[in-house]
Image: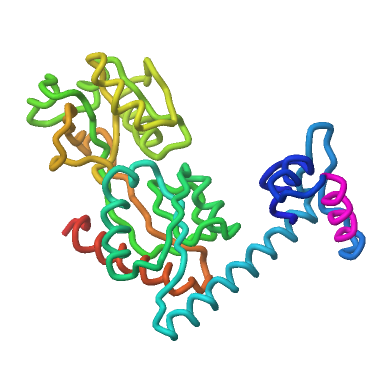
């Protein structure tokens, strides 16, 4: 009931989702607040949002739901059903190739396990873990890492992405200044790739002036096919095995330092069985295929 109102942002929308009247839902909320002893919502002209007391309560509810899911997963595992649900907060780079491949591999062995994939920037992914919205996070260059337990970390250089036949592909050593001679399509500042590009630009005393700035890596990938432009991505989000019209090349570490892709969970949390096993699988894959000697 409470989570439905939080998700919808208003009594009316939540009531529609629950197929009850708004007045009935409002009475339930008021009854709960009376029994709880504190108001948990701010009543706004255009909706409802949790007040500080409500935030604390919501955190408790989600923690309880997480514990229940873990127990259900353990009981199912004991019975041989191997059921469960895995929720992952991840950077967009993990979507095209990495996660589809490894979720499919996991579900081959455990077909009753389901997944939810939550696209998050590096700060949102950490927040998802702390609020139990996601069990695991796969995030490039996290911001705070206060409540982040690292399960695996791998280096990822920034790659320039361009259409096939581009002049940059023939460079023996690709420098950032070479890329900046072309129109650049950049991710917004809340993404780790952009942060590393800013560091690199300062090193060579240049300013990034994108022709397009976007939160969508799909837009970056497709726009470079329409103009002689350059985008940027990390290797785990790219593939040489797929036949595409794009090409890519790593920018030298002389200009841009390698970033780190982290697999993590909420610090101190005991994960449900399915999530724990999937995390172990991903950790092994990352260790074996992406770690540098």
Q: Residue at x 26, y 54 (%)?
A: 101
- Foreground pick, 41 / 169: 41
Nearest the camera: 116 or 220? 116
Viewer-proximal residue among 22 and 142: 22
Relative height, residue 139 to residue 109 (above, below): above
Left or right, residue 53 beside residue 175: right
Quarter of the image for the C terminus: give it: bottom left
The image quadrant of residue 174 is top left
Residue 27 lies in magenta, yes or no? Answer: yes
Residue range highlighted in magenta: 22-33
Q: How is the image coloured?
A: rainbow
**Can you tell which quarter of the image residue 130 is in?**
bottom right
Quadrant position of the N terminus in the picture: bottom right
In the image, taking residue 117 as reference, residue 32 lies left or right, namely right
Residue 181 visible (yes or no): no
Q: Is residue 253 magenta-colored?
A: no
| Residue drawn at point x = 76 percent, y = 46 percent | 15
Q: Horizontal and vertical percent for residue 14?
A: 73, 45
| x then y, percent, for residue 289 | 19, 58
User: Is residue 177 among what the camera can see?
Assistant: yes
- Residue at x 45% of width, y 44% of height: 119
| Residue at point 16%, 39% (across, down) | 242
Residue lying at the far bottom of the rendered structure: 78
Residue 282 locus on image (x, y percent): 31, 62
Front in this rendered view, residue 56 or 274: 274
Characterize the magenta stretch by its predominant secondary structure: helix
């Amino acid at each position: 009931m409470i989570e439905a109102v939080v998700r919808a942002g208003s009594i009316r929308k939540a009531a529609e989702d629950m197929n009850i009247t708004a007045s009935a839902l409002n009475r339930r909320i008021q009854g709960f607040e009376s029994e709880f002893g504190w108001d948990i919502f701010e009543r706004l002209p255009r909706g409802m949002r949790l007040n500080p007391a409500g935030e604390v309560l919501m955190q408790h509810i989600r923690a309880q739901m997480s514990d229940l899911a873990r127990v259900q997963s353990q009981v199912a595992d004991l019975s041989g059903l191997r059921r469960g649900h895995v929720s992952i907060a991840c950077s967009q780079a993990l979507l095209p190739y990495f996660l589809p491949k490894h979720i499919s591999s996991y579900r081959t062995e455990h077909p009753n396990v389901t997944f939810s994939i939550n696209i998050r920037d590096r700060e949102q992914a950490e927040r998802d873990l702390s609020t139990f919205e996601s069990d695991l996070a796969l995030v490039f260059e996290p911001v705070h890492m206060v409540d982040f337990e690292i399960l695996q970390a791998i280096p990822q250089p920034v790659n320039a992405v361009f259409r096939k036949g581009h002049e940059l592909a023939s460079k023996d050593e690709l420098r950032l200044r070479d890329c900046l001679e072309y129109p650049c399509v950049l991710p917004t500042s809340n993404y780790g790739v952009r942060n590393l590009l800013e560091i690199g630009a300062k090193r060579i005393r240049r300013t990034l002036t994108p022709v397009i700035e976007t939160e969508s890596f799909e837009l970056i990938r497709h726009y470079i096919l329409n103009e002689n432009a350059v985008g940027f991505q990390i290797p785990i989000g790219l593939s040489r095995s797929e036949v595409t019209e794009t090409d890519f090349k790593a920018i030298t570490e002389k200009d841009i330092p390698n970033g780190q892709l982290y697999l993590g969970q909420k610090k101190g949390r005991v994960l449900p069985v399915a999530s724990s096993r999937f995390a172990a699988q991903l950790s092994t894959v990352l260790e074996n295929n992406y770690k540098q000697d």
